[in-house]
Each structure stands twice: as C-alpha cells, then as structure tokens.
Image: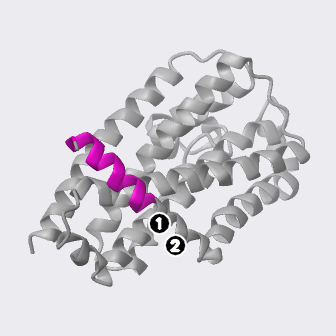
Amino acid sequence: MSALTKIFSETKTMTKRNLWKSMKNPDRLIENLVSPIMTMLVFVFVLGGAMSYSTDMSYVNYVMPGVLILCIGQCSTAAAIGISTDIQKGIVDRFRSMPITASSVLNGHVVESVIRSMISLLVIFLISLLVGFRPKASLTSWLLAFVLLILFTVMITWVSVAYGLFVKSAEGAGSLTMYIMLFVYLSSGFIPTQTLPTVLRVFAENQPLTSIIESLRRLLLSDPLGNYLLLAIIWCIGILVVSFIAAMRLYKNKMNR
C-alpha cells in the first residue's frame, strides 16, 4: 500500500468516526443550524427595515453571503472542540500507539467538518429562499461561488483545528466562535463598510472576510466582481497553508510530550 493510499484509507476511517460522534451529539447539529438561522431571521425581519436604508438592494439579498460565512465559521468551531476533547480524554494518545499517520487524524476532523458545514449551508439556503432571497447567478457564477465556499470551509476548518490544538481545553476551543463572529460582523457581511467609523472601516475593508463575502454577494447577484474574487482566493489559500503547517506542528509537539 502506497503512503498516499494509506493516508486516504486512514482519513476515511477517522472521518467515519467523527461523523458518528456528530450524529450522536444532536446538540452540536442544532447549534450549527439554529444559531445562523436565528441570526438571519433577526437581521432580515427585525433589523431589515432599518438596514435597508443603508443598501441599494433587498436586505435579505445583501445579508445572505454574510450569513453563509457565519454558518460555516460556527460549524468549524466543532472541529476545534473535537480535537481538543480527543486530546483531553487521551484518545489521541491511543492513536499515537497505532501505526496511524498524524495527518489522517487531523484530516478526519477537517473532512467531517466540511460535510457537516455543507449540510448546514443547504438547509440555511433553502430557508433563505422562503424569506425572500433571490439569487441571479449564472451557472458559471454558481460554480465559482460553490468552489469559493468549499475553499473557505476547508481554510477555516484548518484554522479551527490549529486553534483546538493551541488552547488547553475544549471550553477554550469553543471561544473561537466569538472571534469568528467578530470578524464577520466587522466586515461587509451585514452592513456596508462605509457606514462604520474610520478606524473600523479601514479594518473591515482590508480584512479577509470582506473580500470573501463581497465575492459571494457579487457572484450570487451577478454584479461586477472587480478584484474581490482574486483577493478572496489569495486570502483563503494563504491562511490555509499557514494554518495547516501550524496545526501539523502543534499536533506533533503534543505527541512528543
């Protein structure tokens, strides 16, 4: 068996294990779905009337890309909690005693998180159509939007895995949700950046999530992309490479203790 085949087989086994854990933990699935859905409904129906004055389009059309990114971010936090819990309970130590590659253990958490995120996105997208979201994307734009969502999901999940390895407890790993929400809210996800105070506006316009959200919004609504898509891809790939290297080093350091 080649090394690549071995990693693929072990990753599949670890993914099945993590999917089984998620299915036995309905609280996690409910949290991944309910929180983004409630956020969408609150912004659309409670704040949407006031927010509509700040945008030149239907507010539900404006806000949906931000909701999708928020959903993925919140779903990815479960990967941080999962790897931290495995370390606390000594499960990773058991894996260390087996002939299992280090990457397959982490890959299993990443693949499971991506699958769970895609299911959550599908549910939220269907609900968004019921509350008035009307995308105008062409087939090519749909494909580009889907690829961007996958790329962002993989990237933020590796960030979550690295964070889960960095903190010392599952409770600490759960704090990642707060940082993800902060970055989503301080972007163009829910309000135009020009409405923010100068310091916050400069930060919002130059942080990664704004280019990702703007790319999704313009793809789904058939608006001109400008350089947003290129910036989004560069941000995603750059952060993905850094977080993957950090996660692997943190995992190996923990295994050598």
Q: Which residues are magenta?
A: 2-15
Q: Nearer the viewer, residue 226 or 14?
A: 14
Residue 215, compared with residue 1, is above or below; it is above
Numbered disc 2: secondary structure: helix
Q: Nearer the viewer, residue 147 or 102?
A: 102
Q: Nearer the viewer, residue 206 or 8?
A: 8
Q: Nearer the viewer, residue 234 or 97?
A: 97
In the rendered image, residue 31, in percent from the top left (x then y), is placed at 65, 70
Q: Is residue 157 visible?
A: yes
Relative to 168, 222 lies left or right: right
Give the residue number, with chain letter if any, for mark 2: 21
Q: Residue at x 37, y 51 (%)?
A: 158
In the rendered image, which quarter is residue 213 located in?
top right
In the rendered image, residue 222, in percent from the top left (x then y), is placed at 73, 19
> What kind of residue is marked 2?
Lys
Give the residue number, with chain letter if any, for mark 1: 18
The reply to whether discs 2 and 1 touch (Cβ–Cβ < 8 Å) is: yes
